[in-house]
């Protein structure tokens, strides 16, 4: 747990990136684009962290959550309007220890967070959560049957929880709460509570 890492940081508006999630992001802020260009030279790893308020244009440490996701950039595309579209994959939960904003871009010192996995079998609980989401999706058409079928294929309760959390139609603070719940059982219980 004592290993510390340092990477450029990308503050996100209105989205929480979970481990094992792959998604496109559109990046327009100069510092964020510089950070992306920086990581493309190296191992393509970046820290994605959600802003507490999406209105803030130049976020400081107090404007972002202290838990984020170490992620890999799978693809980067520069668009004609000067913005950048990136395809990212969330890898690991991290806790930010130090936030460093130089003039070019933001970076941070952080450590990986190890999940708490109880000894008991969490698959039944995970499947209950999936069934609840499936039931909800019949009412709320925002979640497709494909997504639910994909989640059903997963074998790891932690991955199931993260996938459910990322697809819930809930507030950013609720998603961040799910993200920060390191105990997998508690995370699943929280998801079920939010779905209900």
Image: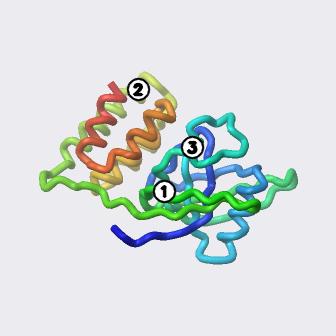
Task: Left or right? Give the position of 17 relative to 111.
Answer: right
Residue at image point 12% right, 52% down: 120
Residue at image point 25% right, 41% down: 186
Residue at image point 17% right, 53% down: 118
Residue most toward the right?
A: 80
Residues 159 and 57: in front is 57
Q: Position of residue 192 (x, y in %)?
A: 30, 33
| Residue beneath disc 2 | 138
Residues 82 and 105: in front is 105
Residue at image point 59% right, 76% down: 43
Residue most toward the top?
A: 139
Label for residue 62?
3
Which comes before the other along the chain, label 2 or label 3?
3
Single out the mark in the foreground, 2 or 3. 3
Q: Residues within 10 Å of mark 1 (few under 14, many from 20)?
A: many
Q: Quadrant of the N terminus?
A: bottom left
Label for residue 96?
1
Vertical arrangement, residue 86 with respect to residue 141, above or below? below
Single out the mark in the foreground, 1 or 2. 1
The answer to whether the residues at label 3 and label 1 have Cβ atoms under 8 Å apart is no
Q: Position of residue 95 (x, y in %)?
A: 44, 56
Which comes before the other along the chain, label 3 or label 1?
3
Q: For the residues marked 1 and 2, what is the alpha-carbon distance in whole angstroms?
A: 38 Å
Q: Position of residue 155 (x, y in %)?
A: 28, 56
Residues 171 and 87: in front is 171
């Amino acid at each position: 747990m004592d290993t510390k890492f340092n990477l450029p940081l990308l503050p996100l508006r209105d989205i929480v990136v979970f481990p094992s999630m792959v998604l496109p992001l559109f990046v327009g802020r100069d510092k964020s684009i510089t950070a992306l260009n920086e990581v493309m030279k190296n191992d393509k790893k970046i820290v994605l962290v959600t802003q507490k308020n999406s209105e803030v244009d130049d976020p400081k440490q107090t404007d972002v959550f202290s838990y984020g996701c170490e992620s890999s950039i799978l693809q980067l595309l520069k668009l004609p309007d000067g913005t950048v579209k990136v395809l990212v994959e969330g890898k690991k939960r991290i806790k930010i220890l130090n936030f460093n904003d130089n003039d070019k871009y933001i970076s941070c010192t952080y450590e990986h967070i190890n999940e708490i996995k109880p000894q008991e079998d969490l698959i039944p609980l995970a499947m209950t959560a999936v069934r609840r989401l499936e039931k909800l999706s019949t009412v709320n058409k925002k979640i497709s049957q494909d997504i639910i079928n994909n989640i059903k294929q997963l074998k790891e309760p932690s991955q199931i929880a993260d996938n459910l959390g990322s697809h819930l139609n809930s507030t950013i603070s609720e998603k961040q709460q799910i993200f920060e719940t390191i105990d997998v059982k508690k995370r699943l219980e929280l998801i079920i509570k939010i779905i209900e």
